[in-house]
Image: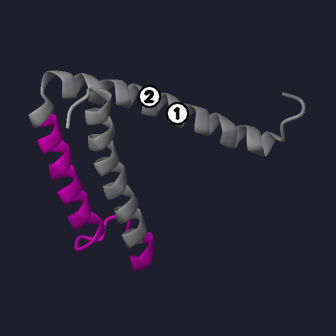
Amino acid sequence: MDDVDPDRAVMIRLRARLAVVERAAWFGLVQAMRTQPAETEAYLMAERAKCAEGFGQRGWAADLTEAERRLLGAEVDAGLAGLIADSKAELGQT
């Protein structure tokens, strides 16, 4: 690791941790979609609605500007929608 800048090494380690957490969460989601697909999808749809309200009207992430909250909310919504579509595709569901 001598040829990696120490500041970049911190960032790379954080990215690695995030990747591990994402893979573990993905496993859990696929398992949930296998055993309870309708309930899991309904839960994720409810979370999308909760996040839309939270980042919109309720002002979650108060340290961000309104425009930044809109961006964050849109990214979270797109991510949750993508999880639903990706997990269904993984399991061959439509």
Examine the rendering and report whether any part of residue 65 can be seen: no
Mark 2: few, some, or many residues within 10 Å (few <14, many ≥20)?
A: few
Other residues around mark 1 within 10 Å, as few (<14) / some (14–19) / many (≥20): few
Q: Indicate yes or no whether the magenta region holds residue 88.
A: no
What type is the residue that disc 1 sits on? Ala
Task: Check disc 2 and report its element: helix, strand or loop.
Answer: helix
x 36%, y 30%: residue: 26
Q: Which mark identifies residue 23?
A: 2
**72 sits left or right of 90 in the view:** right
Q: How far across and down, in percent of the image, does residue 23 sit?
A: 44, 28
**Image position of 92 (left or right of 12):** left
Q: Residue furthest right?
A: 3
In the rendered structure, does residue 40 fall within the stretch colored magenta?
yes
Q: Residue at x 35, y 24 (%)?
A: 27
User: Which corner quadrant of the image does residue 3 belong to?
Assistant: top right
Most frequent secondary structure within the magenta stretch: helix
Q: Is residue 12 above or below residue 60?
A: above
Name the mark on residue 19. 1
Q: Nearer the viewer, residue 51 or 58?
A: 51
Would residue 40 appear left or right of 3 to someone viewing this image? left
- The image shows residue 19 at horizontal and vertical percentages of 52, 33
Residue at image point 30% right, 66% down: 55
Task: Pinpoint residue 5: horizontal percent, then vertical percent.
Answer: 84, 41
Q: Secondary structure at mark 1?
A: helix
- CB contact under 8 Å: marks 1 and 2: yes
* Image vertical order of residue 91 relative to residue 65, above or below: above
Residue 76 locus on image (x, y percent)? 36, 55
Q: Is residue 83 visible?
A: yes
Residues drawn in magenta: 39-68
